[in-house]
Image (cartoon, helix red, strand yellow):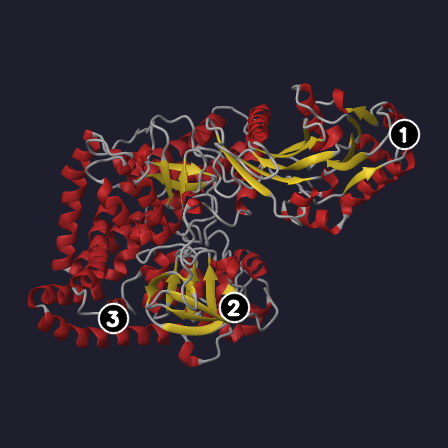
Amino acid sequence: MGSNDVVGLDRIRRDMVPLVGGKAANLGEMAAAGERVPAGFCVTTAAYASGTVPAERVVRAYEAMGGGRVAVRSSATAEDLPDASFAGQQDTYLDVEGADAVVDAVRRCWDSLDNARAVAYRRANGIARADVGMAVVVQRMVDSATAGVMFTADPLTGTRTRTVVDAVRGPGTAVVDGSVEPDHYTVDDGHDPEEVGGCLNRAQVVALAAAGRRLRTLFGSPQDVEWAHDRDGTLWLLQSRPVTTLFPLPPQDLPDLPRFYMETGHMQGMLRPFTPLGLSLLQQVWTRWWSGAEDATDPDPLMIGVGGRLYTDLSPFLRSAVLRGRVARSMDVYGPRVRAAVEHALDDPRFAARPGLPFSASAVLRIVGGVLPSAALGVGYALARPRAARASAHRAVARLRTVRGPGAGASAARRLDWVHGPAFDAMLGRDLTAVIGPVFAGIVTGTVPAALLGGVATKEETDTVLGGLPHNVTTEMDLALWRVAERARTHGDLFTRTPPEELSARYLRGELPDIGLDAFLDSYGHRTAAEVDIGVPRWREDPAPVFGTVANYLRLEDPEQAPDRRFERARAAAEATLAELGPRAVRSRPVRGAIAVFLMRRSRELAGMREYAKFAWLVPFAEMRRQLLLVGADLADEGRLTGADDVFFLRVDEVRAAVEGTDQRDLVAERRRVHRRELRRRTVPGTLLTDGTDVEATLPAPPAARGGLPGIAAAPGRAEGRARVVLDPAGARIEPGEILVAPTTDPGWTPLFMTAAGLVSETGSPIAHGPTVAREYGIPAVICVRDATTVIRTGDLLRVDGATGTVVVVDGRADGTG
């Protein structure tokens, strides 16, 4: 045994985690900072690696403490770390007394490294067993008069400026195991509590909050602290670990704080985190479009990334005396909870009204002088000549398909220059302008009639008119994939029994029969789920999701449920509803009715174009991705990256630095680690303040819908079927007649719609991609159903009403899956 097998807590510091584990490192740092920590020692990972408890040294250290009752706790090297607390996963033994009992407790702590809880936790957090060592902390027990847990940030709302304390009389295990309802205290920074009751007095609460603030400063992040008061009233800090579940903070270095942010990535089907380059490029797209300048930079951006998600800063609009009254109404498309959060912010004095508009003079001139007139002309032309406007848009996309970056032999610097120059020009230039007119006209014709016909037509009727729309590129894509599946029927066993990943590899090697997939990928291979992130592989690179969908289609046995027939039924229902609604509208409101009828008829020619702008700019976007992969390959060859796709884990300026010679491999490894952590996050705040507060979490819970889960009606109709909860469309299987329950949707999800009986999603907007396509297929959709993917389980029998916006769980799972 070595001299580092047993180490006193007074000799331990935070940089000793590999030797003493996270818990002991934190305790040693706390003691060195002057905090009152019970005396003790650590049996290190070196002893664990030897396989034998150093009993003689443990006993000597225990006796040097004076013997008596001690707590024996695990301190694994993956424990109490910023991304993984391992709280409660390994064993703790309290009130251990006697040398032999202490040695035995150390041995049992070692054994707990491989208990079922710890193994499952490591697997869920992507931590390899070989990367974990076990140390054990032995500390004197505190004879607790009161004890409990303190969080230096509110774990429910995410507010970093609030300390939350739970306390009980006696030992704190009752708080940890939930066996007793504790007394609860909250303290906001800079505001000591008024009179308090329960087992703590005001002075004790104030002292706890002050200790929590010191620990938060010491470790540089919010802390989860266990504490106890002994019989003399002395406060002891028993352990401190990072709070690992909080959503990351927005930028703290911007002027005019606080800010109010709204998560907007879900409008493009993005709840998963963007890659750093994906987010960086999307911000540049917005900044260049907004400013009109090729080299635009934005020191105070309207769009920011938090936790890899895309947020829009609404603060300037909330504070604008001119616009603030309209902000809440404009939030209806994002759902009632977002609107309620915005209305709450309007009552917050920190967002009080100020004179003026939230735009610079140059931005106003650009929008008023250039963008709006151009868009208005395009809309007018599309309304007057819809066929010609569509043809112009198609020609624009055909030109975008010819955009190519530098060829073989080009340097990484030249490729990067092309991405930030000609590629952006193509993506945001005149060809996109040619597409915008019919797209905006489609939005107008699809939304205005419902407003004009309030009291004359129901929302279900006006939504039905939008079913089976022609000219929607996403619908056309899905029907084209159906035709591919039809050609694959002669090889049914091959495509239904072979895993999609294997089919993808065989296709790329040219080993599969011709089912028309080449032509499909020529037209649509630049698409994928989460396609607005340039860091996500396109179907052309990895068609595994396409093969998964083909297999779903081949399992469809009822001819009447074939997607083309379903689409035709939706078209026929739309035409019939329009034929009946038109005369009624004109009789009831001659002028408004006639305008509404004109727009509804035009919607049959233009509303399907709603998807086309995104489709258009994704064409050069895919070529930009190809060029960036070539940049990444060059940098990997030169030892500055590990693999070609590492390039997507750098921001734009960091890629440039790598091209100029900087080794970015360590930075990429850290970014990938953070990305994997964020991929595991199931919920994301819809609205967020600078101090980390999830505004919706501070609001009263909405009243429960009678008989069901409340949401927003997004596509008319009613359906009943078993739920299929899907978190990622890649490899997902939807049996005919099942209800798809998803966190969000984008065009990459829509092939699943073609066998689904209905759609339920946690986020979205009636004008977003998923609901638009659901209407065209004639399947009911309810969106903004809070926590749908956790409340609903695969196999639950659901009743979905797309007219009232409700989802009823008729009964629990019938098949035992989940």
Query: Circle 1 is placed at which residue position?
Result: 59
In space, the residues marked 1 and 3 are separated at their CA atoms by: 81 Å
- What's the residue type where badge 1 is placed? Val
542 relative to 162, above or below: below
Crowding around mark 2 (Cα neighbors within 10 Å: few <14, some 14 to 19, many 20+) is many
The picture places residue 697, in percent across and down from the top left corner, at 44, 46
Q: Nearer the viewer, residue 815 or 559?
A: 815
244 relative to 269, above or below: above
729 relative to 231, above or below: below
Answer left or right for 474 relative to 368: right
Q: Using the image, tell me which numbered label, if any, was put on residue 461.
A: 3
Crowding around mark 1 (Cα neighbors within 10 Å: few <14, some 14 to 19, many 20+) is some
The quadrant of the rendering that contains the C terminus is bottom right
SS at mark 3 in the image: helix
Give the mark toward the camera: 2 or 1: 1
Query: Circle 2 is placed at which residue position?
Result: 551
Do we see residue 51 in this rendering? no
